[in-house]
Image (tube, helix red, strand yellow):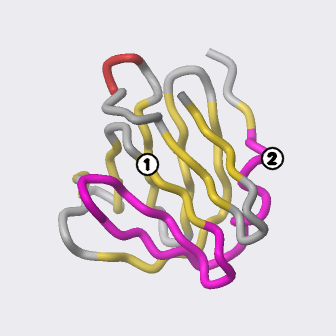
Amino acid sequence: MNEHRSDTFQHLKGKYVTLTVEDEQLRVGTDDGWSLHIYNGYTLSCGERVGALTHASLRLKLVDCLVDDVKMTMMFSGDKFLTVDLTDDGYSGPEAMQLNGPDGSIVIWS
């Protein structure tokens, strides 16, 4: 398993993002128009608590992001982590994740 920092998320690092559940997907958005839609399974770890967001939203500062063949982990300030399952078992479609930029750019993980 080769874990690396993803340059794809460089525009989000250091920014406050809002995590919101919309239509059975998790959305990670910024005030300046970046939006990551997560369709695969995920867990949110907040210190000792682990779970999934339901209908609440959280505003957190993104510190770093690591990606490998089986997971993506977003690290937030305050010892909070979002882990997305990128394995075949975690797939729920239409894709694993989709990042939309304010300039119309799109990056898709399938």
In this view, 15 is above or below 37: below
In this view, 33 is above or below 76: below
Amino acid type of the residue tagged 1 in the rendering: Ile
Dot 2 or dot 1: first in sequence order is: 2
Q: From the image, which quarter does the N terminus lie in? A: top right
Which residue sits at x=25%, y=62%? 53
Would you name the residue on which mark 1 appears? 38
User: Which of 96 and 41 lies nearest the eye of the viewer?
Assistant: 96
Residue 65 x %, y %? 65, 49
Residue 58 occupies quadrant: bottom left
Q: Name the secondary structure under disc 1.
A: strand
In this view, 89 is above or below 17: above
Residue 7, which numbered label?
A: 2
Binning the other alpha carbons within 10 Å of mark 2 as few (below 14), some (14 to 19) or many (20 upward) gives few
Q: Is residue 26 part of the magenta span, yes or no?
A: yes
Q: Which segment did they paint magenta? A: 5-34
